[in-house]
Image: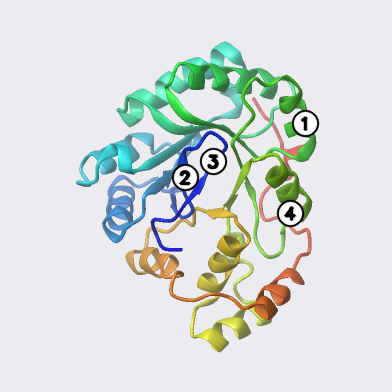
Amino acid sequence: MNLHSTKTLANGVEMPRFGLGVYKMTERDETLNAIDKALKFGYRAIDTASLYGNETEVGEAIRHSGVKREDIFVTTKVWNNDQGYDETLRAFEVSLKKLNMDYLDLYLTHWAVPETFEETYRAIERLYDEKLIRVTGVSNHHEHHLQKLLAKANIAPMVNQVEVHPYLQQDALRAFCSERGIAVTAWSPLGRGGVLDHPTIMEIGREIGKTAAQVVLRWHLQNDTLVIPKSVTPSRIEENAQIFDFELTVAQMDKMATLNRNERFGQDPDHFKFNF
């Protein structure tokens, strides 16, 4: 694997295994500089959302990067109070305009709003049929959410973006997705930094001369999980991507597997506080 390695999705589209998340990047120049740095270093996936308020900056940074649009995998998401069939189609148009793009690579339902997530995904299917997106997907969907979609969908979700890190390994959900050809992307792959001081992770880092963050990100890749770590710090953007010159041993992967606590740093999709 290398920084440009991809995972072949159910429809044959190649999705980068490693990208930049831009959650909480709210300062314009900082956002532009972070994306520029990432693309110059070799990142080829950018993950944003309407909620993040930076779609305009993402589009601008990509246009000025010197990298061809078709070589960058761009993801955004429809926020909870914009869900439903017609509402999602309208929200997509707003995002596309802000990004100033002709199409998106991946469009996700941000959270599974109980009353609307099925209709939201139906709209995503339409966008796919109309070739406005290359890949269909969802985020923060448990197995029971996916089962509801799969029972009706003409096009199964190809990606599920969920919270995954050493303290929340999501083995059952990842297995369910794998069996159905749904790629899993980890948001908060470093547990918002909360896992990096664990003695086991630090010990493995010392053994191989890598940082705790690099150990965790490599662990994700070896578990066939796509990752989108976020950072605005140039040195950290480089450091996070320097995970392709080593491999964790079977013994080290086994040690990592013991760290699961079913502990979330974000909200549980079944108990999200939907306030509209």
Q: Is residue 247 above or below residue 130?
A: below
From the image, state whether disc 1 or disc 3 is nearer to you.
Answer: 3
Left or right: 173 in relation to 197: right
Q: Earlier in the sequence, mark 4 or mark 1?
A: 1
Q: Amino acid at mark 3?
A: Leu
The crowding category of the residue bearing disc 4, from other C-alpha atoms within 10 Å (few below 14, some 14 to 19, many at least 20), is some
Which disc, if any, is residue 132? Answer: none
Q: Dots 1 and 2: beta carbons under 8 Å?
A: no
- The residue indicated by pointer 3 is 9
| Above or below, comparing residue 57 to residue 104 in the picture | below
Q: Which residue is mark 4?
A: 170
Q: Earlier in the sequence, mark 1 or mark 2?
A: 2
Calculate the distance from the C-alpha at mark 3 to the C-alpha at mark 4. 20 Å
Spatial CA span between label 1 and label 2: 23 Å
| Discs 2/4, front | 2
Distance CA(mark 4)–CA(mark 1): 16 Å
Residue 162 percent across, percent down from the top left: 64, 46
**Quarter of the image holding residue 102?**
top left
N-terminal label among 2 and 4: 2
Check disc 3 and report its element: helix, strand or loop: loop
Q: Position of residue 128 (x, y in %)?
A: 50, 22
Residue 219 location (% of width, % of height):
60, 67
Q: Which mark is residue 15?
A: 2
Q: Residue at x 28, y 53 (%)?
A: 33
Which of the 4 quarters of the picture holds residue 114? Answer: top right
Q: If the image is split into quadrants, where does the C terminus sit?
A: top right
1 or 3: tag closer to the N-terminus: 3
| CB contact under 8 Å: marks 3 and 2 | yes
Q: Which residue is mark 1?
A: 147
Question: Is 30 rendered above or below residue 90?
Answer: below
Judged from the image, the secondary structure of the residue bearing numbered disc 2 is strand
